[in-house]
Image (cartoon, grey):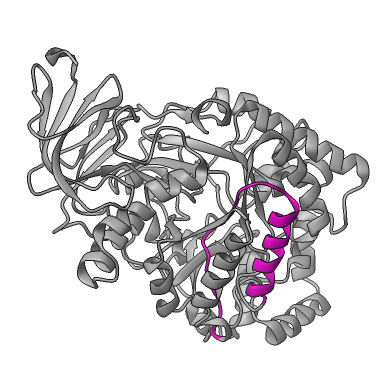
Amino acid sequence: MPQGTKNFVIRGGTIIDGTGADPFVADVAVAHGRIVEIGPDIATGDAETVDATGLVVAPGFIDIKTHSDWTLPLMPRAESKIRQGVTTEVIGHCGYSCAPALPGKVEALAEYLSPSAPWLTFRETSFADYLTNYPALSVNAIHLVGHNTLRLMAMGMEDRPPTQDELAHMNVLLNDALAAGALGMSSGLFTAPGSFSDTEELVALGRTLEAEGARYFTHLRDEGNNVFDSVAETMEFAEAVGVHVQIVHMKLSGLDNWGGAQKILRMLSDARGRGVTIDCDDYPYTAASNQLRNLMPSWLQEGGIEGTLARLSNPDDRARLRREVDAEGLNNFGRIPSWDAVRISISPNMPNYAGRTIASIADERGIDGFDMALDYIKEDRGQTRVLVDSISEDDVRDFVCSSDVMVGSDGNSVSPEGTTGQGRPHPRFYGTFAKVLGHYSRDLGLLPLHDAVYKMTGASAKALGLKDRGLLKQGFRADITVFDPATIAERATYEDPHQFAAGINTVLVNGVPTLQGGDHTGALAGRTLRRQTDFL
């Protein structure tokens, strides 16, 4: 191309192109938001140069599993993700989406999502208007519509199958979201109201996904004692409905289930061998995060928050909850060592308890941990999020080492400053990608760096069906991350999570410098990626 038409030339970096191929040294030229040339000694002309000597030049990382829709409207600079090298986020997971919000149902949706999005303002909106009015962002955003939200809009928090009219209503709302550009539907079968659904209901909605060429993302019905049955249920769905299925944040939770990662990987491999299009992702931590109320049997939440609070005041219901948890462990989490494994993360009505364990608060009050957990749900009106240390490090390592498992943070875009700097969120919000590249790849040597990059770029782009992102390739969008392989590291901890990752030097989003020399430029060059235009 003519010498003067380039915007940037990234000079002399080690190219890891996202395909899984071995690294090589070359220059990368960018013009008009796209990669226009990769090779040695590219003529610079009038282009700005970035010296990447000794650094890795990679595709921008794709965070395939996030809940940043709860924070991006408040913090569109997406600081914790940009500073990890993330340029694209998939949002609306686990059955939770902030739209549609139908007339008369806005308060119910706000209440339902309050433990996760306590500072977000909800308003009546269709999914199309929601996407149209989404703010400018520093990252690209891929939206999903949540099955739990659809069910809430159609039939509230009732524990029963939908009527034909209610199922038809959900399908209309799903079609509207897909027509607006949603990539697909997510489900959260571990908690109400998604847990009230059966496979037949999901398959009926899956037929709509299949007809529109959309995709399905699922939080398994149980990641604890019934995790293998839940994977089998997902495969049953995948075999009945011809859509790509993504199992999100794959884990084996609870002491009784540790050591099963290789069995899960074999199940997925066998399914692919039968022609099932199924993938999964994982985050590299032993603690999960969820709403405290979701740790209890899902019947507690039937009828919404008022029903929940009434049951928590009923001695018979509390006794029933105790019996079921004693017998089965925590909902979706299985058996934990003690209530010291459950730590308050965000507590909107009682922020002074952030960072404390349920056990420590129980000791302070002179009651047992189980009663303390129930009391806390009641006192915080169900809005509490917790961290639950319930996963084996050996299983985490097995998933990290597998080229068939992508990297997803399950975290929000946040910042130490402002509203999203409150509480003690999971360190994965700030450190997921840096931890894989630094701790697991460089420090422990569990996987080569180019394999680690593949898991968070090319593999995720393929699973999502992205048209021209996820690789360093001529003609592809210039989503590019430049990092120092010697210093990239997670700095966030459970005790002090609000710390940006180290070692990320430069990030381009659609060819626009968004991080330069480790500093955020303030650019909001991200795009809303829609199924009809940005995917294969």
Q: Is residue 226 visible?
A: yes
442 vs 354, left or right, is left
Find residue 510 and report its image quarter: top left
Please state the horizontal and vertical placement of residue 163, each as a whole percent of the image: 92, 47
Please state the horizontal and vertical placement of residue 181, each as a whole percent of the image: 60, 29
Find residue 184 and report its image quarter: top right
Residue 81, relative to residue 182: is it above or below? below
Which residue is painted at 64% across and 31% down in the image? Answer: 123
315 vs 10, left or right, is right
Which residue is painted at 72% across and 71% down in the image? Answer: 297
Please state the horizontal and vertical placement of residue 361, each as a whole percent of the image: 51, 77
Which residue is painted at 49% across and 76% down in the image? Answer: 262
Residue 427, relative to residue 341: is it above or below? above
Q: Quadrant of the N terminus?
A: top left
Q: Is residue 498 visible?
A: no
Please state the horizontal and vertical placement of residue 31, each as a whole percent of the image: 24, 21
Residue 79, relative to residue 323: is it above or below? above
Q: Nearer the viewer, residue 196 or 437?
A: 437
Q: Nearer the viewer, residue 292 or 58?
A: 58
414 vs 378, left or right, is left
Q: Nearer the viewer, residue 105 or 199?
A: 199
Residue 243 colored in magenta in the image = yes
Numbered circles on residues, count: 0
Residue 125 colored in magenta in the image = no
Task: Specify the farthest residue to the right.
Answer: 164
Magenta residues, start to end: 226-255
Residue 221, relative to residue 238: is it above or below? below
